Amino acid sequence: MTQRLKLVAVSGGLQRPSRTLALVDAIVAALADRVPIDLHLVELGQIAPQIGATFDRSRLSAVEQAHLRAIEGADVLVVASPVFRGSYSGLFKHLFDLIAAEALVDIPVLLAATGGSDRHALVIEHQLRPLFAFFQARTLPIGVYASARDFADYEISSSALRGRIALAAERAVPWLSARPSVAEQAELEHLSV
């Protein structure tokens, strides 16, 4: 049986309903159609008050700490943020400020963003990709940007967006299957000792 990948999806939206969460859900579903996954969802809006109130990770509750450990232990990340004034929100950045600097080395990350119009589409290249470059993560070549016109009542209504999601998921598969999962890597390291 094929190893299930620990996929952690981070939705940087701060409210519900959320176009960002709808985009994350669609990307995760497209990946799940192609590779077996175990999903852990982190909704920033649900943990923002606790995350935003501290710079010391040890002061967080067990719930928030479990989310941070899930991000650090992921085999693959799907990370999406709404655009606030040309970038991700400060709370989104603060969430990743609490992640250990070496925790995401070589982890594949599929980047996504939502914005009011197409003029924010480069947020993936100019804001999100550099953030994950700091972590030495493997940002996947194709990100997914969606504007407000791609949704109706917080649901994806655009066939073009569905096509971009399918293409990103399809192109992600070789990056996901080419690397051992965290569990397989730990087993390999144990055997080499």
Image (cartoon, rainbow, N blue to C red):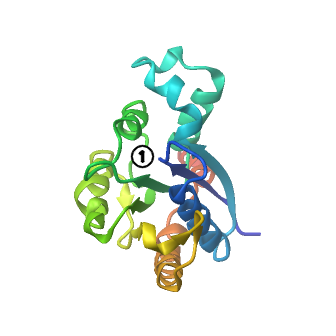
Residue type of the residue flagged with mark 1: Leu
Foreground of the two, 160 or 5:
160
Residue 115 at x, y percent in the picture: 38, 61
Which residue lies at the image location 37% right of the left edge and 59% below the top edge?
138
Q: Residues within 10 Å of mark 1 (few under 14, many from 20)?
A: many
Pinpoint residue 12: horizontal percent, then vertical percent.
47, 47
Residue 134 placement, left or right of 102: left
In this view of the protein, can residue 23 be seen by the observer?
yes
Residue 146 appears at what percent x and percent y?
Answer: 42, 69
- Residue 145, quarter of picture: bottom left
Q: Residue furthest left?
A: 126
Left or right of 81: which side holds 58? Answer: right
Asked whether 171 or 2 is in front, the reply is 171
For this orientation, the residue located farthest to the top is 59
Q: How many marks?
A: 1
Tell me if residue 104 comes above or below residue 35 in the rendering. Answer: above
176 on left or right of 133: right
Q: In the rendered image of this protein, does residue 105 appear above or below residue 108? A: above
The residue labelled by disc 1 is 104
Image point (61%, 74%), residue name:
30
Taking the spot 64% from the left edge, 77% from the top edge, the residue there is 34
